[in-house]
Image: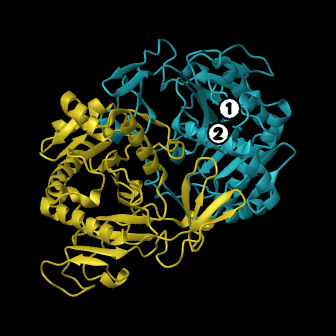
Chain colours: A cyan, B yellow
């Protein structure tokens, strides 16, 4: 059973895999490359290589766990958390732990091994967003869970072990540190101003314009004022809303359009960079409907020699967001 | 002039290099390897390749900026912050910024290109610690500065661009996020218990024993209860003290002994892993003498496919600290 443990100083929760523990030799053997087409468990016809599917969209029919799907969601074969069991919160002296209860699912975004999000059509991207929504609404019914972390690692440097386009979700019985901090910050702002801090950001950035990359009726893509990473890009809905999974249909449609375009811009300006994409959304258990605002953060991994930032949360960014936005705006699509 | 910018939601400060900005091409050209012996600016005889020295220890004489030194401290040739100027805190609408005033220095730990800390003698390591202390005491007199971040990137994967053993310090007009969080956590603990949380950790861990790697009269090395990284190791002084630069001589001596031994253990168990080493110490401007406890954190960079953690602060660790401590204790020195 994996374990969740809390750092007694900072309150940060970490997942410790206590089952299939990595010993020193395992790190030496770890591949730094990704698994290609030949042995790809996510390609059509290889459905038996994954655990049985939780959800699939099949415009052209096809039976469960058989080819014919457009989007397919399966449990992670090597999950960080375990669905079955009880949480069993307990103390060990001054330390706090609980069982690693939760879910870890993979959203296989397309049957095409080489069709990254940037290359998919807008309706195809929208379909991926709907599959994520559907899984989140289902998992929300599990009273043990407090947060769903929806993310995408693209490229080996960004942590992807499989090439085939996919996202992941990790459903957790705790709220991760970085979400907690954002919520506390958003609450502080709301307490003082009676306004959502993200709404204020959208308003100021659209007025200023220097950091705006692109916008449509519902969504704006911008380089944030204090980015941790070069070419970091945020996608924010213009309308206030705390929960990704409760967004109206037209926002998914608009998000799909902006997302495709932003990923194309990054691909062209930076030659297909590895990146992490993270959906920031409200925890289930917390009422921050007025203060919090769901959004998407994309962090390209460009500085190959970085390493210090990882583990300190202290960032030195070699590219200003004004410059990054200018470069990305100038890309011809 | 580099800039410090504050994220309006989380309050996190980042350094933005606005002078020598990186454009897309610069990332493509960036080397992923380190600079070797031939062009090493830190080797004796190459003193002219660095800015003039701020400090050197020379048991065998030799003039300033000439060979003969044992430890040498120079300004970083490509600094993240600038020493000259005024801070000029200002708002840009809802955003906050200030000039990137500060210092960025390099501690060249030895004249020997290949002698890593693990291979140095204990008195040699102690000398490095004293050089760091001396620079910190000097920089503390600058009223503009609030924190000194003392760290070491070892190996290309951990962010080192030069092979030659060296540490760095970055003196900042702000307190970095990860230090602020630690201090807030330590204060919360002190408010409730009237005890230092790190003293409590040392006490409980020495009593328990499962996560202790090594100890001597003054210092204990342990695998923390909730580590972010496999084989993460903390070195804590047993005696309470908030500031690294005010530690008594015998603690440096003891720290040098444990540090050498722990780095040897990591080198043997994990085949010379890349790592980041960070000294956590109290900010100048904050009085947390009772609640905070300086210490050293070592984070090996073993999981080559990581990337997601970087930027979220959400960690999945494949090796339990009990297992890591057991492996490191068992290494024969």
Secondary structure under badge 2?
helix
The residue labelled by disc 1 is A288
Q: Quadrant of residue B248?
A: bottom left
Secondary structure under badge 1?
loop
Give me the residue at 61% from left, 63% from top.
B97
| Residue B240 vertical position relative to residue B141 in the rendered view, above or below | above
Describe residue A313's horizontal placement relative to residue A110 as left or right.
left
| Residue A117 vertical position relative to residue A203 in the rendered view, above or below | above
Residue sitting nearer the eye, A293 or B230: A293
**Looking at this rendering, what residue extends furthest in the right direction?**
A217
Q: Can you see residue A293?
A: yes
Query: Marks 2/1: CA distance?
Result: 8 Å
The residue labelled by disc 2 is A187
Quadrant in which the N terminus of chain A is drawn = top left
Give me the residue at 19% from left, 73% from top.
B70
10 Å crowding of disc 1: few (<14), some (14-19), many (20+): many
Quadrant in which the C terminus of chain A is drawn = bottom right
Residue B76 x %, y %: 40, 73
């Amino acid at each position: 059973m994996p374990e969740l443990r809390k750092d007694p100083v900072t309150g940060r929760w970490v997942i410790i895999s206590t089952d299939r523990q990595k010993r020193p030799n395992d790190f030496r053997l770890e591949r730094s490359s990704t698994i290609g087409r030949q042995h790809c468990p996510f390609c059509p016809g290889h459905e038996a290589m994954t655990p049985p599917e939780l959800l699939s969209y099949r415009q052209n029919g096809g039976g469960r766990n058989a080819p014919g799907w457009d989007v397919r969601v399966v449990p992670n074969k090597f999950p960080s958390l375990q669905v079955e069991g009880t949480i069993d919160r307990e103390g060990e002296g001054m330390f706090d732990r609980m069982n690693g209860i939760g879910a870890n699912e993979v959203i296989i975004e397309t049957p095409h091994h080489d069709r990254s999000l940037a290359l998919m059509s807008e309706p195809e991207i929208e379909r991926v967003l709907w599959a994520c929504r559907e899984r989140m609404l289902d998992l929300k019914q599990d009273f043990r869970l407090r947060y769903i972390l929806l993310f995408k690692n693209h490229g080996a440097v960004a942590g992807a072990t499989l090439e085939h386009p996919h996202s992941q979700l990790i459903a957790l019985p705790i709220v991760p540190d970085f979400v907690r901090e954002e919520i506390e910050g958003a609450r502080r702002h709301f307490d003082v101003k009676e306004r959502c801090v993200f709404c204020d950001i959208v308003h100021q950035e659209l007025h200023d314009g220097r950091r705006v990359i692109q916008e449509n009726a519902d969504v704006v893509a911008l380089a944030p004022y204090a980015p941790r990473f070069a070419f970091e890009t945020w996608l924010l809905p213009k309308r206030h809303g705390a929960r990704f999974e409760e967004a109206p249909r037209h926002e998914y449609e608009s998000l799909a359009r902006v997302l495709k375009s932003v990923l194309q811009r990054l691909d062209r300006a930076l030659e297909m960079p590895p990146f992490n994409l993270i959906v920031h959304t409200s925890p289930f258990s917390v009422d921050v409907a007025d203060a919090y605002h769901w959004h998407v953060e994309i962090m390209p991994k460009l500085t190959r020699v970085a390493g210090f930032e990882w583990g300190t949360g202290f960032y030195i960014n070699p590219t200003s967001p004004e410059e990054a936005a200018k470069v990305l705006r100038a890309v011809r699509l």
